Amino acid sequence: MRARVLHLITELVVGGAQDNTLTTVAGLDRERYEVHVAAAPGGEWVEWAGRVADCVHLLPNMKREISPRHDAALLRDLGRLYRRERYDIVHTHSSKAGVVGRLAARAVGVPIIIHTVHGLPWYEGMAAPRRYLYETLERVASRCSMRIITVAEANRQELIAKRIVDAARTETIYSGIVLDRFSQPVDRARGRLAIEVEPTAPVVGYVARLSEQKAPLDFVAAARLVLEELPEAQFVMVGGGPLLHDVLAATGDEPSFHVLGQRDDVPALLPLFDVFALSSLFEGVGRALTEALAAGLPVAATSVDGVPEIVHHEQTGLLSPPRRPDLLAANIVRLLRNPAWARQLGRNGQSLVTPLFDSRLMVAQIDRLYQACLAKSHT
């Protein structure tokens, strides 16, 4: 008899956690599992969820921000859903779904509760009361979890050090990607012309959800510093999100900036860049960063959370502290001024991530975890 599994995530917007979740849902063996997805209504990837899941449940009371009224209603709605569908496994993703979803699962007696931490919801410099609240909520929800998956070993170690969860209930499973998508040949000159980028210019790419976490305005500030030294450089920003209008206001009509918004052809865009940059304040590992390395790009990134697990300074890329656009800019300039060395870093990065981040490996590891939990729950 197939195990019934629910993957619960806050939103089905374009993002690394959502990509990880839906890639897992698509890859799980349907001879072993019936797999459902639940999330807030809306979001660019609701249709994708409908294609890969056996059933999709949309939850009107699922709100990203803390809302006592909606969160209480969501707790009730999830309890009803869990009872009706009789899930063997509830696997939660992201902070809101992770907290409310696990509490509801414990309350109604779901046998197996698993949570994936795609990135810790707190970061250095966050206001202390907010950080304390997030840590407390995660500590409470973790008590409901049979297992917790982290997508970065750094996140796992921090959870253990803060005594949010004990080591025996944690496991790092890197967030896999479909590697074949990043090895297809691309006509670089034609691709650049299609996005109105000078074919021979040095190009720096940035792919991320334009949100506080990714600090896109820090990237814009770094780009302006790069232009002071390399005025011929051009900058391509790919992604949508709540700070899109701020980014558009900051870049205006300047010809050095190309703000493309949300795109579904990132694998075809990455080969158009000479350098990939990321200015995040916190990450798991950074799915866009992994994809850039899989495409063989040299990267300049902020040294946060799990990023140093794949960006080894001066080996697979260059690192700088968060909130230091000046240092990020300096690293971008180093890469652009030393193209042969930069290409070697890109090759090194590609060799590192290819065996570790194959989506098939990720799904196999999650499958093994499910089977171990099912065996334990039946004893």
Image (cartoon, rainbow, N blue to C red):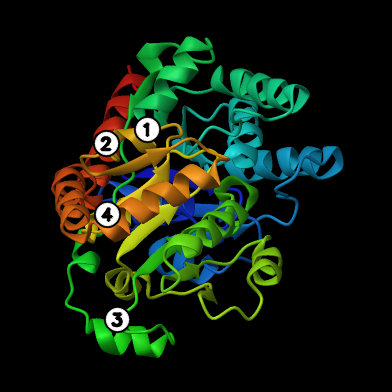
Residue at image position (70%, 20%) is: 132
Amino acid type of the residue tagged 3 in the rendering:
Thr
Relative to 356, say whether 109 is above or below: above
Q: Nearer the viewer, mark 3 or mark 2?
A: 3
Mark 3 and mark 2 lie on one chain; the one further toward the N terminus is 3
Q: Is residue 300 visible?
A: yes
Query: Of tags 1 and 2, which is closer to the observer?
Result: 2
> Mark 1 sits on what residue?
152
Contact, CB < 8 Å: mark 3 with mark 4? no
Please give the residue where the numbered disc 2 appears in the rendered image. Answer: 312
Percent from the top left, x then y, of residue 234? 44, 72
Identify the mark nearer the N-term, 4 or 2: 4
4 or 1: tag closer to the N-terminus: 1
Q: Residue furthest right?
A: 69
Asked if residue 154 is positioned above or below residue 121 in the image, the reply reads above
Report crowding for label 3: few under 14, some 14 to 19, many 20 or more residues within 10 A (C-alpha): few
Q: Nearer the viewer, residue 293 or 227?
A: 227
Q: Could you say which quadrant of the image residue 95 lies in?
A: top right
The answer to which of 231 and 13 lies nearer the viewer is 231
Q: Observer-nearest residue: 29 or 351?
A: 351
Q: Amino acid at mark 2?
A: His
Marking on residue 200: 3
Q: Are marks 1 and 2 in contact (CB under 8 Å)?
A: no
Q: Which mark is residue 298?
A: 4
The local crowd at label 1, few if under 14, some if 14 to 19, many if 20 or more residues have their Cα within 10 Å, is many
CA distance separating discs 1 and 3: 37 Å
